[in-house]
Image (cartoon, coloured by chain):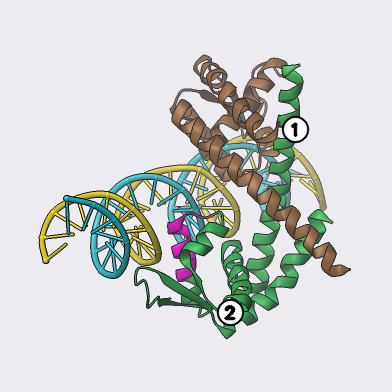
Chain colours: A green, B brown, C cyan, D yellow
Amino acid sequence: MEAVVDEGVCTKWSETLRVYHNTSCELENELQDGHDLGLSEFEVLKILSRSCLKGGGKAKMKELEGEMYLSQSALSRTVTRLEKDGLVTRATCDFDRRANFLMITPAGVDRFEAAEPTYRAVLVRHFA
Amino acid sequence: MEAVVDEGVCTKWSETLRVYHNTSCELENELQDGHDLGLSEFEVLKILSRSCLKGGGKAKMKELEGEMYLSQSALSRTVTRLEKDGLVTRATCDFDRRANFLMITPAGVDRFEAAEPTYRAVLVRHFA
DNA sequence: GAAACTTACATGCATGCGCATTGGATGTCA
DNA sequence: TGACATCCAATGCGCATGCATGTAAGTTTC
C-alpha cells in the first residue's frame, strides 16, 4: 500500500525530471545559439517586457526575484550581463536609494522579440 | 486560437519549473544536511544499489550515464567524489579495459539506506 | 598488421549558481 | 538624536556542470 504510493511519487518525479531536463536544455541551447541569450537572461527580459507594458517601464530587483527561481546573487549577475550587453539599464530609485529600477532598452526589446518565437516553439514542441 | 495554445504551454512549463525547482532544492538540502550527499550522488547510489541486486553488484559508467541527466564528465566527477568518500569503488573491466565497473561498498549501502527515507519523504510531500 | 577510426573515461577550462558577507540606505525606538 | 535592526543589492568564494580535449584501449579497413 505504502509501496504503491512510493512507486507513484517516484514515477511522477522522474517524469518531471525528464520533461524539465529536455525542455530546459533545448531552450538553453536554442536561445544561446540563435539569440545569444541564456535562459535566465531571457526570463528577465520576458518579465521586464511584461512589466513595461503595465508598470510604466520599470521593475525592481526584488520583484524580479520573486518571479524567478534564482537567488538574489544570481539575479544580480544575470542583470549585470544583460546590462553589459546593453539590453537593460539599472537606475537607483529616487525614493528608496537601496533599490534599483530596471528598464529594458530598445535593443533589449528587439532581442526579446526576436527570441520569443524560438522560446514558444520549443515549449509547443514539448507540451502541445 | 494559436494564442490559446501558447497560453497553455507556457502554463505547463511554468508549472513544471515550479515543481522541479521546489522539489530538487528540497531534495538537495535535506540530503546534504542529513546525509552529506548531493542529489547527483544519491542518484548514483540509487542506481547502483538497484543494479547490485540483479546485476551481480556492478554497473558500467556508460550504463549510469544512460540513466541519469548528467554529462559524462559530470558523472565522472560525481563518482570520484563518491569514491573519495568510500561509498563506491572503481575497477577496470577485464574484458574491455577502457570501461570501469562500479561497485557500491557496504558503507555506500548504509549511507544510501539511511538517506532513502528522506528522499521518499520529500517526494511524497510534493507529489502525493 | 598498420593506419584510421571509434569508444570509454578523465581532465583543463569557463561559466553560472548559491551561500555568506559586505556596504550603504531606511526604519525604529528609547 | 543616537544606537540598533532591517533591507537592498553587489561581491568573494567554493562548487557542480558542460564543452572541448587528452589518453588509452578496442575495432575496422585495406
The part of the chain drawn in magenta is A70-80
Q: CA distance from mark 1 to mark 2?
A: 40 Å
- Comparing D5 with B127, the one in front is D5
**x and y percent of residue B110 in the render?**
52, 16
Label 1 lies in what chain? A
Q: State left or right for residue A59 relative to residue B127.
A: left
- Helix, strand or loop for disc 2: helix
Q: State left or right for residue A102 relative to residue A116.
A: left
In which quadrant is the N terminus of chain B drawn?
bottom right
Q: Which residue is the site of mark 2? A: A108
**x and y percent of residue A31 in the render?**
66, 67
Q: Specify the principal SS of the magenta part.
A: helix
Q: Does residue A96 show up?
A: yes
Q: Which residue is the site of mark 1? A: A11
| Residue occupying image coordinates x 75% and y 53% | B12
- Comparing C6 with B43, the one in front is B43
| Residue occupying image coordinates x 45% and y 57% | A72
**x and y percent of residue A77 in the render?**
45, 64
Q: Earlier in the sequence, mark 1 or mark 2?
A: 1
Q: Amino acid at mark 1?
A: Thr
| Residue occupying image coordinates x 51% and y 30% | B31
Label 2: how many residues lie within 10 Å, few (<14), some (14-19) or many (20+)? many
Q: Amino acid at mark 2?
A: Gly
Picture quadrant where residue D7 is located: bottom left
Q: Examine the structure image and report whether residue B40 is included in the region drawn in magenta.
A: no
In this rendering, is residue B102 above or below A87? above
Q: Which mark is residue B69?
A: none
In which quadrant is the C terminus of chain B drawn?
top right
Picture quadrant where residue A125 is located: bottom right
Label 2 lies in what chain? A
Q: State left or right for residue A3 relative to residue B42.
A: right
Q: Examine the structure image and report whether residue A73 is included in the region drawn in magenta.
A: yes
